[in-house]
Image: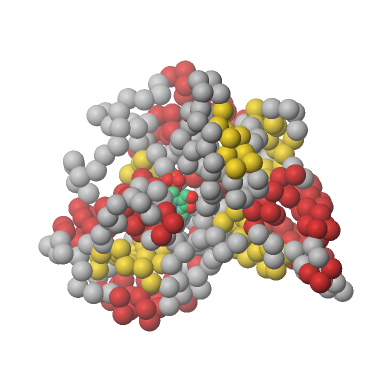
Amino acid sequence: MQYNATIVPPRRGGTIHFNTTIGGSFLVTSHLMPTYTRADLAFERGEGAWLVAENGDRYLDFAAGVAVNVLGHAHPHLVAALTEQARKVWHVSNLYRVPDAERLAERLCAESFADLVFFSNSGAEAMEGAIKVARKYQSANGQPERYRIITFEGAFHGRTLATLAAGGQKKHLDGFGPVVDGFDQVPLDDAAAVRRTVGPQTAAILIEPIQGEGGVRTPSTQFLKALRQICDEHGLLLLFDEVQTGMGRTGHLFAYQKVGVVPDVMALAKGLGGGFPIGACLATAAAAKGMTAGTHGSTFGGNPLAMAAAHAVLDVVLAPGFLDHVRQMALLLKQRLAELKDRHPAVIAEIRGDGMLIGLKPLVPAADLVDALRAQRLLSVAAGENVVRLLPPLMIGESEIAEALDRLDRAAAQIEATLAPAEKVEPAK
Ligand code: PLP
């Protein structure tokens, strides 16, 4: 998100005031590097799908920490698992075996196409791992000149230098020096452009099954199938970034399972720890051929505390009926949102997405809708293409959906009231 900040220099213990182009003036803690546009709102605790602010106001959390808190807040199983592990051992490093990491890798592999897992601490790191796996694969096969990766317009893969280059967004790259070489970006859903771009240096194709940050843009299944075919024809690896779509977000444990296109490498993070920082790069044994001892590492990656969190998340997400419930609730939410769109045609132009990764495309600036929803104590997240994302915790039920819709209705009505008469549109009958 862009902002123009007027910075009042901090005094010790003081605060900096920002005047931003979105949503007016914000107050932020003084000594944090001002890289985020934060709302002036802090939460003290959470309960399920609700967050309680410092002043006691209760917010319905349809942001879930940007698709992270899949089990909501303070889920008893997660709390118990972390508390128990905290009393035993937090961190030992990767100088030693971590049995719970071995067990978690085994569970993830049993549920996916993968044979091997590398644990890291964030989505960007998981993606760095995926990029390294792809380059090393080609190198281990005697073709080190094949290092380039085809990526897609609108992509987001993280904020490290390589993942920024993979995302290719000018606003993110600006001012950070030479862009890391090795990424060729083509339009989404354009298989012919992908075919034209594959060359003797191409190592892999990298795609999000649904672009989250890019505006909840879903490539066609036909396109994803074409990517698989192109990879197979040219000896390339297919990398899926499921950092946002993974861990049940689409109603399936991994989005690729619904689409029926199987990657060679997949990055996970966000939902995997339910709020505890963890990332994972999953790969087939063939794709990870080059990842031998000493080729990659992380001090914290796969530590016992993170493993306990991820096991607890998996226990719940894989429990019989959980993903069925997610799919049912997602369907209900989508139906109710379609009705909302019909009631407020001057405010909501489009509903998009899959499962609990939903985009509302408003006819007003997305930031205005996010602000209006927050004023109704409903949390959402802005994305590219002027889209507002709804990313509720996956355990929400009918009552939270009804509550969210009431709040969405009120926010839309409030926006309507501010529109000039010519902009108002009669609701669909
Ligand atoms: N990949 C995707 C698809 C994402 O949505 C994100 C974060 O939003 C990332 C990678 C980066 O993850 P992190 O912020 O944990 O580094």
Quarter of the figure with residue 384: bottom right
* Image-based side of 84 in relation to 108, left or right: right
Question: Outermost residue toward the top?
Answer: 87
Quadrant location, the C terminus: bottom right
**Rendering coords of residue 226 (x, y %):** 40, 76
Q: Is residue 271 left or right of residue 118?
A: right
The one of 370 and 33 positioned closer to us in this rendering: 33
* Residue 96 drawn above or below residue 247: above
The answer to which quarter of the image holds residue 147 is bottom left
Residue found at x 38% / y 61%: 168
- Whether residue 360 is visible, yes or no, is no
- Count of number-bearing discs: 0
User: What percent of the width, then of the height, locates residue 234?
Assistant: 25, 74
Asked if residue 363 can be seen in this view, the reply is: yes
Residue at 81% over, 54% down: 414
349, 306: nearer the viewer: 349
| Residue occupying image coordinates x 37% and y 65% | 151
Colour setting = secondary structure
In this orientation, which residue lies closer to the viewer: 386 or 2? 2
Work out which residue is located at the far left of the displayed protein and give it: 142
Residue at the spot 20% in from the left edge and 45% down from the top edge: 295
| Looking at the image, residue 413 lies above or below residue 200 | above
- Residue 209 is left or right of residue 53, and the answer is left
Q: Is residue 427 left or right of residue 306?
A: right
Q: Position of residue 99 (x, y in %)?
A: 35, 32
